[in-house]
Amino acid sequence: MSEQTPPPAADADSPDAADNAPRDLDFAQARLAYSIIESLLEHTAVLSDLVALMAQVIDADTTRALTQTPNWAAYLESRRRMEATRADVEKFTEIMKELGEGD
């Protein structure tokens, strides 16, 4: 069995190294990301309000049947993840405010 030699590591100046290097977002990119996140959060809030309203107008048997489906379990899990993400969103908002002050 022959031993294979690993390929040489990429130089910092090589094109491969540039592709793998971490990149910082500039303010415009960060602002766009913030705008997208903000829109998704607003949509989620509206959707949650709609689900709550719909739950109020359906009868108890239908509500019970609905809440025992995998779809309902997935909805609740998604809501839990969104709540857990709230701290990250607040941190991101603070970073965006700091970036905005630099302009």
Image: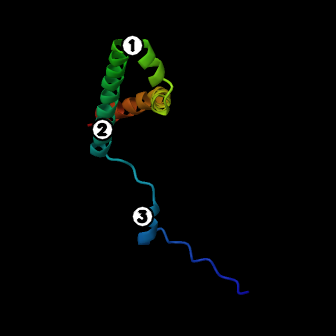
Q: CA distance from mark 2 to mark 1?
A: 36 Å
Q: Residue 6: horizontal and vertical position, in percent? A: 62, 77
Q: Residue 12: horizontal and vertical position, in percent? A: 48, 68
- What residue sits 57% from the left and 76% below the top? 8
The mark nearer the N terminus, 2 or 1, is: 2
> Do the residues under discs 3 and 2 have CB atoms within 8 angstroms?
no
- Which class describes the residues within 10 Å of circle 2: few (<14), some (14-19), or many (20+)? few
Q: CA distance from mark 3 to mark 2?
A: 25 Å
Say if 8 sits above or below 36 in the image.
below
Local SS, label 3:
helix
Closest to the camera, between mark 3 and mark 1, is 1
Q: Which residue has dot 2 on it?
A: 36
The mark nearer the N terminus, 3 or 1, is: 3
Q: Which residue has dot 3 on it?
A: 19
- What residue sits 42% from the left and 64% below the top? 19
Q: Nearer the viewer, residue 59 or 101?
A: 59
Badge 3 amino acid: Asp
Local SS, label 2:
helix
Q: Which residue has dot 1 on it?
A: 59
